[in-house]
Image (tube, grey):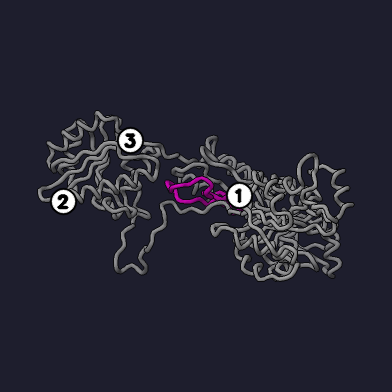
Amino acid sequence: MKFGRVPVPEAEGAILAHSARLTGRVLKKGHVLSADDLALFVEDGVEEITVARLEENDIAENDAAARITQALAGDNIKSGDAFTGRCNLIAQSHGLITFDRNNLDDINLIDEAVTIATIPTYDITTPGQLIATIKIIPFAISKPVLEAILEAIGKEPLVSIAPFERKNNGLIMTRLPGMKESILDKTLQTAAARASEFGSHISEEIRCGHTESEVIDAINDIQGKACDIILIFGASAVVDREDVLPAAVVGAGGEVEHFGMPVDPGNLLFLGNLKTTPVVGMPGCARSPKLNGFDWVLWRLLANVAITPRDIMLMGAGGLLKEISERGQLRQDQPALGTGASEPKIAGLLLAAGSSRRMGKKNKLLAELDGTAMVARVAEQIKASNSVGLLVVTGHEKENIEAILKDHATSFIHNSDYADGLSTSLKKGLSALPDDIDGVIVCLGDMPLVTSKHIDQLIRAFDPVEGRSICIPVHGRKRGNPVVWGKQYIAEILAVTGDIGARHLLEDYADQVIEVPIDQDGVLFDVDTPDRLAELKNRSPS
């Protein structure tokens, strides 16, 4: 790849190395420069720009990222689309992420140009969660580097998700003289809650005295109850392999594979088996719902992930879970188990409140195109996209709009002030959006040539961390609609008055704007006059 400054007239087809703010436009780094783009530089008096040009042996960043991502993705994982050299792995299942940490390290050591970042191995995943990102650092990598990466990954995918399966868990709890039953009741409640979080349950429960013979009888009894996992909780902590609980497992014909673990709390856990049935001696800390070493073992068993003594002995890195008073900050209000990031949630917002004043008496949104109302066609495309839900703002002819969109919209909100301008509908819709979104795509009901593909291109470009929190479609040299806005701008948009929408914010936050090239002009085509409607009826949505 060639990189450096060149005269503007020589830069056509090259990759822009640094974002450029020009009169009326912002061109982001990575943009492939067209003749129209170069004309903008000339108009602004720019004579030289820094660019990159790919050479014969180069693989463009998006192509390289996509190929590596596809090679990495295993069971229950979806590969995202590459954008600006980044491609993500998305979880498709509630389970545990599994991969060979050493293999991942070896791949990351091959070349500085290729990076793979994941959540920790054996972390809990949820559907839609971002679990890994592949980033090509420069604008391209050489073919030998790509081949080396793919060879290191191997023929089998590196990253997979082992889904949690419904398991029947048997629980044996021992008691000492004078022990209150309420303690065992609470232990059962906590164990049942742990299992149910992953779709399993405690199917059998036995309480017995804390003696080897009584525990052996309980084990023999519960073995006949078709339990997938046997959990044993002692009234007294296990302090040796010859102690009551592990000795009882051996006495019942089983095996103790490992005692102790480098996780605190959770040190006094033991792992064994009764033929093919796993047995876990639970540490005393498992009476509490707080995260402890027992959870790490239970998760693997519920996901059918093999766990060996070596696996347990390697849990020390990151295994200090205990809170002590000397710690600078205690973990208050622990979040739910499994805390990975996720794909951005971009809400769909459709503005369908206008009175169509330039159309005469006819409501343009209800005009039929091949038997479908214009506004319904727009709603169909939003619903088919990767946006989350569809909130429709109504105004003029509210009842008719709601009737047509009842099968498409998630919810409606009425703007009684629709005659006062677009901003009133925008504010009404934004104020009704849920709190758990990352952004919103604002769509107009009179732009039926915008497709779900266009919407997804805009959503894919959204990445506030990389300075892409406002995503605008561009066809040729013109900006269009719809626009994706990050959640952080909603408060400012709500302060807008009149009929100007939020256009002025595009200038205020130009460094956060990404222009997304769209190869059809549907993002520029709105219907606001009878002539425009006639023109539309002679076209087909792209």
- Say if the magenta span includes residue 107: no
Left or right, residue 32 beside residue 103? right
> Residue at the location (56% across, 49% down)?
110
Q: Residues within 10 Å of mark 2 (few under 14, many from 20)?
A: few
Front tag of 3 and 2: 2
Front tag of 2 and 1: 1
In the rendered structure, which amino acid carries the disc numbered 2?
Lys
- Mark 3 and mark 2: Cα distance apart in space: 27 Å
- Say if the magenta span includes residue 125: yes
Q: Which residue is mark 2?
A: 180
- Mark 2 and mark 1: Cα distance apart in space: 51 Å
In the rendered structure, which amino acid carries the disc numbered 1?
Thr
Do the CB atoms of the residues marked 3 and 2 lie less than 8 Å apart?
no
Of the pair 421 and 506, the residue shown nearer to us = 421
Mark earlier in primary sequence (1, 3): 3
Against 147, is 293 above or below?
Answer: below
Q: Secondary structure at mark 3?
A: strand
> Residue at the location (84% across, 70% down)?
45
Front tag of 1 and 3: 1
> Residue at the location (76% across, 54% down)?
32
Q: Which residue is mark 1?
A: 410
Do the CB atoms of the residues marked 1 and 3 lie less than 8 Å apart?
no
Mark earlier in primary sequence (2, 1): 2
Please state the horizontal and vertical placement of residue 10, each as a whole percent of the image.
84, 58
> Residue at the location (28% across, 47% down)?
189
The C terminus sits in image quarter: top right
Please state the horizontal and vertical placement of residue 231, each as a whole percent of the image.
26, 40
Against 48, is 520 above or below?
Answer: above
Q: Which residue is mark 3?
A: 168
Provide the residue span drawn in magenta. Answer: 110-134
Left or right, residue 198 beside residue 388? left
